[in-house]
Amino acid sequence: MPSPRKNILVTGAAGYIGSHIALCCLLSGEYSVVTIDNFSNSFPEGLKRVTKIAQDALPADATEEDKKALEIEVFRGDITLKEDINQVFEAYKSKGGIWGVIHVAAHKAVGESGEKPIQYYENNITATINLLSIMEKYEVYRIVYSSSATVYGAPKQIPIPETSVLAPESVYGRTKHMSELILKDVCDSKPDLWRAIGLRYFNPAGSHPSGEIGEDPRGKPGNLLPLLSQMATGKFAEEGLKIFGNDYPTPDGTCVRDYLHVMDLAQGHVDALAALLRDDIFQNQASGTGFGGSGGKYKAYNLGKGKGMSVLQMVEAMRKATGFDYKYTIVGRRTGDVPDLTADPSLANKELGFTCKYGLEEMARDQWGFNKKYPQGYETKK
Amino acid sequence: MPSPRKNILVTGAAGYIGSHIALCCLLSGEYSVVTIDNFSNSFPEGLKRVTKIAQDALPADATEEDKKALEIEVFRGDITLKEDINQVFEAYKSKGGIWGVIHVAAHKAVGESGEKPIQYYENNITATINLLSIMEKYEVYRIVYSSSATVYGAPKQIPIPETSVLAPESVYGRTKHMSELILKDVCDSKPDLWRAIGLRYFNPAGSHPSGEIGEDPRGKPGNLLPLLSQMATGKFAEEGLKIFGNDYPTPDGTCVRDYLHVMDLAQGHVDALAALLRDDIFQNQASGTGFGGSGGKYKAYNLGKGKGMSVLQMVEAMRKATGFDYKYTIVGRRTGDVPDLTADPSLANKELGFTCKYGLEEMARDQWGFNKKYPQGYETKK
């Protein structure tokens, strides 16, 4: 008997966010996961652990078949090549087909994107176009897309609603904005077939409470939380922590961001998969996309807590979680940083049923949980 | 002795605009032309005639070598495939290299673009990214890009300066806008190397006065002038001419567009190639791009006459040129049409030395010239 689970292709499922999305898909009981990943910034080991966590969560009377449905089929491949994507869809023709896609794979470093724009456009735009082309070929018309709060640039209104002007200020942000525009045009071209939801991530943090999977970037982390967490293992001690500006118009002068637990973020994707089947959310489009209304079924949602935290608040939370005494120096503002990026997540709350269950303390605890258990990340020897 | 001409890769040189650009490159005496074309909407015959016209224009004492330098090397290939582009640059490594690129190849039908967005993004965006990637690999950092007045959408100010808000209202227009943004980001990433000029075309019309090359779209022409010209050969007679709206706020109620002779447009590309070498034009960027200033060397220019002509004026001009008695019916406005799209070309006049030498009468004469001589286009039997 074939599994009653629907097959979801999660691109880049081995990465930090992808692995948590894959896990939430499996934990939902609704979905099986297949992935295509080139492991450019991730490790296959993460996917094995995702399966293990999901299997451990099965009831005691689970069958071998139930366990097997939680295995993640991995296609090692590069989504900038259409033939690599094609092989996945072709292979699944005889396995009930791909029901829907969660497109996570992308290059994601804002600073680097300005230095290597061609690579970023190739990985984030050509790849998205390739994926849509192959999806259309195999008549798979459901997609949830990883967008980013960077599409807003420096927003005029805080908290930021989805209807804000989209004016990204980095190459990375433009790749996300363009991908949303492309998705919208594709949905408009065949309103009876295509359905897509773009999820604009604010600042994901933490990891699954088991500490088995987590954020393991190659080299020095570009983001605050993984850096703080790795520093607590003794790394980057000589370089210390630099805080870019403490003279912003915020309560303590440091930048404010909207951190949310990665398990909440990941669950938002499972919520979005379910929402793809609903007609009502696509009817009042102009309220949600920031594009203005049209006939097609594309809609974008903010995934954030709606509550901002400053850099100093995050350092303090990580100090409590790790016991590490962070030394920092205040240096000048960093080009492109804006004082406050706090989401208005009310649309996702209302239409997707998205909620944030985890608080700041748990984010810090779970960010540290993975690094504490695996100080060398996925390459830690047991 | 190698030719002193610089090698220019003109993508899509067999097409209507590409063939006139190739011709102006050859006529300049400065450039040789190589092309990559998949002949999806064009014929190889056009390129042979370009060479013939250029050879006929040589002085009587021209050598065989002079004639040979006017031959256009054709690589049959698809620029959505990186390896096809790569072969051109690889082949030219031993021939002095590619000096610069004029990127013309694209899908260009506004209406169709909304129906087939994936194809348009693939042909117009993936292809541009591929081209830039291979250019960077072979250290070719000069490019002139075929943009379009559609990047302005419905402009607030007529005539339209380059600093207008860019708000395209079609998939086609978005592919051109995104390509400009990508070019700008690439130029910003390496300001000492990359130089790019985007040329925003208004409405090219006519053909080389010899009538040997011209506009030969597959199927019924989507644009007014080629349709009128083909109608004069007896085609599409039963369907008649439809004019979409005569209640626009224009002198005669029909839409006003900025028609310019394709030889003037093509010469603008030769002007732009020369301008790539100048530093001054890139210094006051904000005045030209509509993006705001930055450190990189990207700049966009309008190519138009700066003088609008209404649909009815064009019908009358074509009646005079062809002697054909056009019957037309006024039907409702067409979605997406705006009343007036007239360029402000003063920036291109001033900084590129771009001028329009041909008038309306010559545009109509030369539009008809090709169809009169070749009623079945390039497939006409002699």
Image (cartoon, coloured by chain):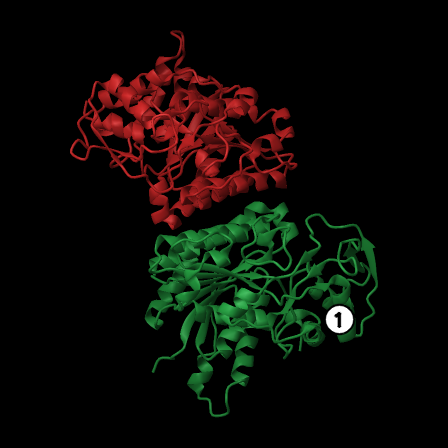
Chain colours: A red, B green
Q: Where in the figure is residue A60, as x and y percent of width and height?
A: 38, 7
Residue A4 image position (x, y, % from top left): 51, 19
* Total numbered badges shown on the rendered structure: 1
Q: Position of residue A314 (x, y in %)?
A: 31, 24
- Could you tell me if residue B367 is visible in this image? yes
Among all residues in the image, which is located at the extreme top? A60
Residue occupied by mark 1:
B317
Image quarter where the C terminus of chain B lies is bottom right
Q: Residue at x 42, y 62 (%)?
A: B282
Specify the amino acid type for callout 1.
Ala
* Residue A141 shows up from this direction: no
Quarter occupied by residue B381: bottom right
Report x, y in % for residue B264.
58, 72
Left or right for B222, reference B172: right
Query: Disc 1 on helix, strand or loop?
Result: helix
Q: Nearer the viewer, residue A100 or A356?
A: A356
Quarter of the figure with residue A37: top left
Mark 1 is surrounded, within 10 Å at the Cα level, by few (under 14), some (14 to 19) or many (20 or more) other residues, namely some
Q: Nearer the viewer, residue B126 or B380?
A: B126
Q: Could you tell me which quadrant the N terminus of chain B lies in? A: bottom left
Query: Quadrant of residue A40 in the image?
Result: top left
Give the residue displayed 33% in from the left and 67% down from the top: B93
Kindly give the residue lying farthest to the bottom in the view shown: B61
Along the line of sight, the residue nearer the viewer: B64 or B182: B182
The answer to whether B145 is drawn above or below residue A372 in the figure is below
Q: Chain of mark 1?
A: B
Query: Is B74 left or right of B228, judged from the image as shown?
Result: left
